[in-house]
Amino acid sequence: MSKVDPSLPYDPFLKHLGNNDNYIKALCLHSLTILLSKADKQGNSGAEIDNEVLIKLFDTLSSNHFIGSNESSYQAIGIQILQELVISKNFRQVYQKHNLVSNFKSINHLISNSARLPNSSSLQLSYNVLLTTWVLSFSADINRLLIHNYPDLIGSLLTISKDSIKLKIVRMAVSILKNFVSVSSSESDKFRTIKIILFDDGLSIMKTLQERKFASSGSDDELSNDLQYLVDTLSEVVSEKLSSLDEYLTQLDNPNLISWSSPVHKSSQFWLENSGKFKDNSFKLVKRIFQILDSEAHVPAKVILLNNLQSLIKNLGQDLVKFINEANGGAYKLRIMTLLDKNDGDNELKYEALKTIQLLVGHNF
């Protein structure tokens, strides 16, 4: 058909993707998916028009009409069509290259919902969402992007695996976590993923799952093997590689994980032993702290980081004071002042900003 008319066979369906009727859109998406899948199996997916069609499909599927919709029926349609597409390695590569991060946002939202309500009535939708994520998790590049941009995804998967009553959902959540660890671009990526899993209490959750009947009885070999792999890998890191500084660095990489529940923030021994490392590479870690203070990170994280700066000033003294006062044209000190002066600021945030400024001023006399 394409030899007769280059607009065929896709254009008659593509023109209806902008239709106001979601039912018509769904039928067009379904038809396009069938056509593209057939072309892929015949080895024709390298044609440029196929990539253009795929990109339009991916954007439509992730929109608020389908996976991003508030209606579970359209969410289910969107996720099943996407799943059918990304099963193809060729299509998965296009999905990865074309704004994977923004397109995955709707899926991450659905997984977060499943973590909050792991045994709600939408169990089949939850399973299909996890199945689609599992298909994606066989790509090391995709895993790196997902974990970097959605570190909360790991916590959601751990919650689902711990709390869900459906074996197939538990199996899928654990298998994704296993792939996140085992399918990595480098040892550093693998270690970064493991640290996030450990930070979310992943080792104890995996050990608890091993004790449940479906795993301990040996009735589900695949799940048992995945659990054993994760327990062995996480245990090795805990016993041989992980330090309290690694835990802190994991939080700096993923600011939404910053919490008083981590003992490093209140440990005077931690700051006594590790403050010197914050001077390395021209105060690289201190610069990262100020990046977070200058971002849209949640207020409790900023409160904790200001408290961390106070510990650093006490241990590093004039070296850090001079850096904060003079580096970047005094912008770092100004940032703290801004947090102090905000009329709509949180009282606890203002208090920690004030204490930090007092320490900075005190070291100048």
Image (cartoon, helix red, strand yellow):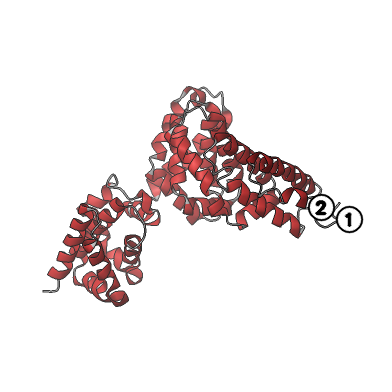
Identity of the amino acid at label 1?
Answer: Val
Evaluate whether residue 224 shows in this view: no
Tell me the residue that label 2 is attached to: 8
Relative side of 336 to 281, left or right: left
Q: Give the crowd class for mark 2: few <14, some 14-19, many >=20 residues within 10 Å.
A: few
Q: Give the crowd class for mark 1: few <14, some 14-19, many >=20 residues within 10 Å.
A: few
Numbered disc 1: secondary structure = loop
Relative side of 57 to 358, left or right: right
Relative side of 19 to 309, left or right: right
- Quadrant of the image containing the C terminus: bottom left
The furthest residue to the right? 4
Q: Are marks 2 and 1 in contact (CB under 8 Å)?
A: yes
Tell me the residue that label 1 is attached to: 4
Q: Is residue 239 above or below residue 161?
A: below
Q: Tell me the distance, in whole angstroms, between the alpha carbons under discs 2 and 1.
A: 8 Å
Q: Is residue 277 above or below residue 163?
A: below
Relative side of 305 to 54, left or right: left
Q: Is residue 74 above or below residue 14?
A: above
At a point 68% along the width and 49% down the height, the residue shown is: 89
